[in-house]
Image (spheres, rainbow, N blue to C red):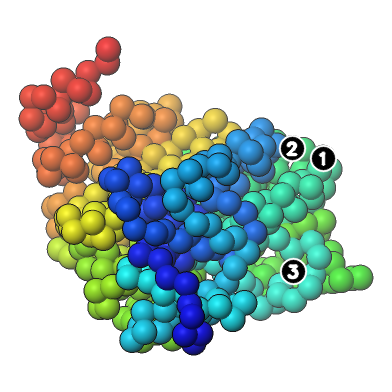
Amino acid sequence: MNQQARAFDVVIVGAGQAGLQVAMSLVDAGYQGGILLAGDEAAYPYQRPPLSKLYLSGGLGEQDMELQDPGYYAAHGITVMTGTAVTAIDRAAKKISLATGEAIGYRFLVLATGARARRLPSLSGTLENVFHVRTRFDAHALRDALQPGRRVAVIGGGFLGLEIAAVARTRGATVDVVEGAARILSRSAAGPVSAVFGRLDRRHGVVIHAAGAVQRVETAGGRVVALELDDGGRIAADAVVVAIGVSPNTDLAVAAGLDVADGIRVDGQMRTADPGILAIGDCAGFPYVRDNGAHVRVESVQNALDQARCAAKTILGQAEPYDRTPVFWTEQFGLRLQVAGIPQGADDVVIRGDVPGDRFSVYRFKAGRLMAVESVNMPADHMLARKLFSHDACPSPRQVADAAFDLKSLLPHAAQQRLEPS
C-alpha cells in the first residue's frame, strides 16, 4: 500500500444512513478526530425506506430524502468520498485501499456496507426491463417504467415486493406477484397478518401467485416479454421487479479474515474480532439479548441507527451493550403494519383485537417468552409493545389472551403515564 497514505481517526465504509449516524453521533459528542465517510454510490447519504414508497410513487423528491445539507459535512469536519469503492483492508497496517489506488490509514474502521439485492440467474445480464430496488437510481429507473396500463410482474411477496406492487397499482399498472412460499410475507409476518394483506392486495387488483416459481423467461429484443410459471401459467410483462431479499455486503470482511456468518459477526458493543474494526446495520450479525444472545442479522433502519450510536460510544470509550429491540413497518393501500421484535423460532401465537376489522395485534412467543408483536392498524399497541420490551416487562400468553387484562399494568407507573393520550 502507499506509504504516504492519508489517515483519519475514524474511517466509515458505507455512506448510508447508518454510516452517517456514526459520524453525527461522534460530532454531537464533541469528538475531535478526523472522520472519513466513504461510499461507492455517487450520492451523499439519503433515506432508503421511501424508495419503495413515497419516492417510487413520485410523492417525494431527491432533495427531500437527503439526510443532511451538503454544507453540513465540511462544517463539522466530516470528509465525504462518494462514488469511491473500498477494495481491501490491511488490518496489520490499519489501512484501507480504494479503487483509485489510494491507501488511507485509520485508528477505528466502521463497516457499514449494507446489503445488496439478490439476483435470479434466469433474469441476470442485460435485460433492460428487469429491476431491483436498492438505491435511489434503481427506484428512479423503475418509477419511469410504472406507467398506466403497463404490465408489471413482481417476483417476491415480502415487504419490498408488496410495497412496489401497491405503488404500481396506484399508478395504474396491472400487477402480478409471484411468491415461492405458500403465502405472502411468510418470512416477515404471522399467518393472520399475511391473510389481511393478501385480501387487501386482491381487492386492489393485485394478482398473487403463491407457491409459484418462474420456470422459464421469455425474451425478445433484450427485454423480458413473459414469465412462465411452474404450474403452466404465463404472465405477460412490460417490467419485471425482482424483490427476493438481500445479501449482506461482507466481501471486504471475508478478505480481511474477519468472522462472517450471515453477516459480519460483532459483539454487544459492535466490535468485530479485531478491536479496531466495528460493523453495524444490515451487514452485521449481533448477539440478540432477547433470544439468549443468538446471533441475528436485521434489516431495519431503526436497528442500523441504534447500532451506529452504539458503535460511536464504543469509539468514544463509553461502550454499552446493545440491547435495543428491532422495529419494522410497512404501509400498503393505507393499511399499516408495525412490528416490534424478531419472531424467529416463535412457537405460539396469540391474537388480540378485531381481526375482521383489520385492527389487531399478533403476539408471538417462544417457549412462553414474548419475541415479537405485529400490529395491524394499531399504533397504540405497537408503542406499548416497544415499551414492554424496553422495560423487560413482557406478558405471558395467558395475559395476552385475556382481553380484560390491561397490558400496560406490567409497566412501571411512569412508563404507563407516558403512554396515556394527551
Question: In this view, which residue lies farthest toward the right?
Answer: 221
Nearer to us in this view, 153 or 384? 384
Q: What residue is pinned by disc 2?
A: 171
Task: List x then y, in percent, for residue 70.
Answer: 57, 44
Task: List x then y, in percent, for residue 385.
Answer: 24, 37
Q: What residue is pinned by disc 3?
A: 228
Residue 14 shown left or right of residue 333 in the figure: left
Nearer to us in this view, 142 or 163? 142
Q: Residue at x 60, y 47 (%)?
A: 51
Q: Residue at x 39, y 59 (%)?
A: 34
Task: List x then y, in percent, for residue 164.
Answer: 63, 48
Above or below, 267 relative to 68: below
- Quadrant into which the C terminus falls: top left
Nearer to us in this view, 171 or 114? 114
Work out whether residue 221 can be spotted. yes
Residue 405 shown left or right of residue 325 in the figure: left
Q: What residue is pinned by disc 1?
A: 148
